[in-house]
């Protein structure tokens, strides 16, 4: 089986309804909250090169997309889903890595963040350089938080004034911040 992971192209927009269905089924099976997305929202991500798709002979195997917030200061990697038929192949990790790299390429000055209830996603994020952060460190754009309104845990988020929920917030430095940290570290090594 050959899995093709790539930046989604306009012709992949036909998969948007199936992606939405997979997201809803996954949330229901796990009994966790997930922000629901509509096919037209995902189609826009696909058509603008802000999504990664995994296919096996034109069958949807997985997906994730990016969204910018606070005028490009933050990028969220969202909507990670793997078709149950293709699970246990390390596909989530590969898709997450591809969407992370796409985010850094398109938005080198943006910090990359996500919120999740999935321990597996937290592990993948950690391996990519994300660290847990408080919700106050995330974008404060109302539009981002409105995306959580379809989650069954939204009342917890609003009751806590968007400071905590059942999700864990994680953030990675921007590509440029990471590059600068490496330069600073090499300067410290040379000086010692």
Image (cartoon, rainbow, N blue to C red):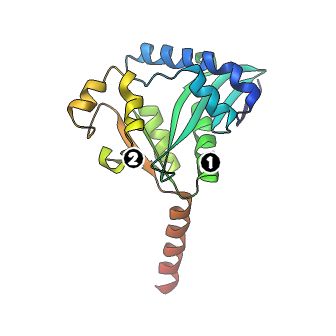
From the top left corner, tell me how far across and down residue 127 is, in percent. 50, 46
Left/right placement of residue 93 relative to residue 57 reads left
Vertical arrangement, residue 52 with respect to residue 108, above or below: above
48 over 27 or under it: above or below: below
User: Quick one: label 2, few (<14), some, or many (20+) residues within 10 Å?
Assistant: many
Residue 134 placement (x, y as % from top left): 30, 47
The residue tagged 2 is 139
x and y, in percent, of residue 164 in the image:
26, 37
Relative to the observer, which residue lies in front, 28 or 65?
A: 65
Q: Is residue 88 visible?
A: no
Q: What residue appears at the point 52 percent right and 62 percent down from the top-left corner?
A: 178
Q: Quadrant of residue 30?
A: top left
- Going from N to C along the chain, the mark reached first, 1 or 2, is 1
Q: Depth check: 105 or 72 in front? A: 72
Which residue was labeled with disc 1?
101
Q: Secondary structure at mark 2?
A: loop
């Amino acid at each position: 089986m050959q899995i093709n992971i790539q930046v989604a192209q306009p012709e992949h927009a036909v998969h948007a309804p199936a992606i939405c269905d997979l997201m809803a089924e996954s949330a229901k099976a796990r009994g966790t909250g997930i922000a629901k997305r509509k096919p037209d929202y995902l189609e826009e991500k696909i058509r603008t090169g802000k999504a990664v798709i995994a296919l096996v002979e034109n069958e949807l195997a997985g997906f994730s997309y990016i969204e910018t917030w606070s005028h490009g200061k933050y990028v969220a990697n969202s909507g990670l889903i793997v078709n149950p038929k293709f699970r246990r192949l390390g596909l989530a990790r590969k898709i997450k890595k591809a969407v992370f790299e796409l985010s850094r390429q398109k938005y080198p000055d943006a910090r990359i963040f996500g919120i999740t209830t999935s321990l597996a996603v937290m592990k993948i994020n950690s391996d990519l350089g994300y660290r847990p952060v408080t919700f106050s460190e995330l974008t404060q754009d109302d539009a981002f938080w409105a995306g959580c309104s379809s989650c069954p845990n939204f009342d917890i988020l609003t009751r806590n004034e968007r400071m905590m929920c059942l999700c864990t917030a994680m953030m990675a430095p921007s590509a440029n911040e990471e590059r600068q940290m490496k330069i600073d570290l090499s300067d410290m090594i040379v000086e010692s």
